[in-house]
Image (cartoon, rainbow, N blue to C red):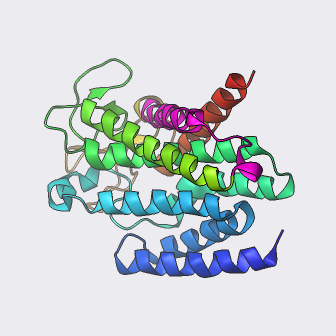
Amino acid sequence: MSFHNLAIGLILSVLIALAGYKKRSLSRSGVAGAILIGTIIFGLGGWIWGCLLIAFFTSSSLLSHYKLGEKAHLADKFAKAGARDLGQALANGGWGAILAILYSLRPNPLLFIAFVGAMSAVNADTWATEVGVLSPSLPRLITNGRRVPVGTSGAISPLGTIAASLGALLIGLLALALAQVGAPPQTGEPCLRLASLAALGGLAGSLFDSLLGATVQGIYYCEFCGKETEAPLHRCGRKARQVRGWRWLDNDVVNFLSSIAGSLATAAGWALSNH
């Protein structure tokens, strides 16, 4: 562990988090979460890891502001909308931070591959949500294909799936480009497999997120507004009735689990392709 690297990671994370707060992409608690996650990933994983984290945060933040007016009416369907808070920062970057800690203790190229998969998954999922809700056609539940209203948890659309694939591919291509510079400590011999496996693993993580959303994620219904929501307390201020899923499995937990799924899928693909 290098305290010099941690110090640099802290400084960079503070600057990026404050910029995110200024752009209203992060809440105050989100700033704390971003600084914590960024410091760990930058300081313990290295600059390549940090660049991938920045790519996720930057691209996702830009998309969250894309056609914001057209997406505003869907805010009450989601557990959280607007600036990301501490829970969202930990959900999206927590698993990546754990991998960075493990890498600092016992450097292994497979841990970097797993990290790429984690970032690909959270980027894919965010892109799918931010772009998918703009789909001109109604999405379908991933479990049975039934058409449901836009914003329904567990629903997917062609537009959202394409966006997820592109979001995952972006991380994969960036990882490939950066690995060309830092190949020896990262992947050994960088190749196109890294980008393709990251794209597939990230998409798998995003689809796993949708599967959890359609089956076991806690979903509620506001009797007063007549709307389904992911939050036990609806945005109108009234308590919503739970209609399915597990109460403890909220959207943050789902995002965290999907990052693990994308990570494992990418690492498994890498390991199998090397045999």
Q: Main secondary structure of the magenta part?
A: helix
Q: Quadrant of residue 244?
A: top left
Does the rendering let one see residue 222? Answer: no
Along the line of sight, which residue is nearer the eye, 203 or 24? 203
Q: Where is residue 207 in the image (x, y as percent from the top left)?
A: 44, 31
In this rendering, is residue 71 above or below 135?
below
- At a point 37% along the width and 56% down the height, the residue shown is 233
In this rendering, is residue 244 above or below 27?
above
User: How many numbered markers are drawn?
Assistant: 0
Left or right, 54 with respect to 43, comes to: left
Can you say which quadrant of the picture contains the C terminus? top right
In this rendering, is residue 224 above or below 57?
above
Along the line of sight, which residue is nearer the eye, 149 or 1? 1
Does the rendering let one see residue 24? Answer: yes
- At a point 32% along the width and 35% down the height, the residue shown is 162
- Which residue is most to the top? 144
Q: Where is residue 261 in the image (x, y as percent from the top left)?
A: 59, 36
In the rendered structure, does residue 196 fall within the stretch colored magenta? yes
- At a point 75% along the width and 44% down the height, the residue shown is 109
Q: Position of residue 213 (x, y in %)?
A: 43, 36
Q: Quadrant of residue 274?
A: top right
Can you say which quadrant of the picture contains the N terminus? bottom right
Query: Which stretch appears magenta?
Result: 183-212
Along the line of sight, which residue is nearer the eye, 243 or 157? 157
In the rendered structure, does residue 78 fall within the stretch colored magenta? no
In this rendering, is residue 206 above or below 230?
above
Q: Where is residue 115 in the image (x, y as percent from the top left)?
A: 64, 48
Along the line of sight, which residue is nearer the eye, 2 or 242? 2
- At a point 42% along the width and 63% down the height, the residue shown is 58
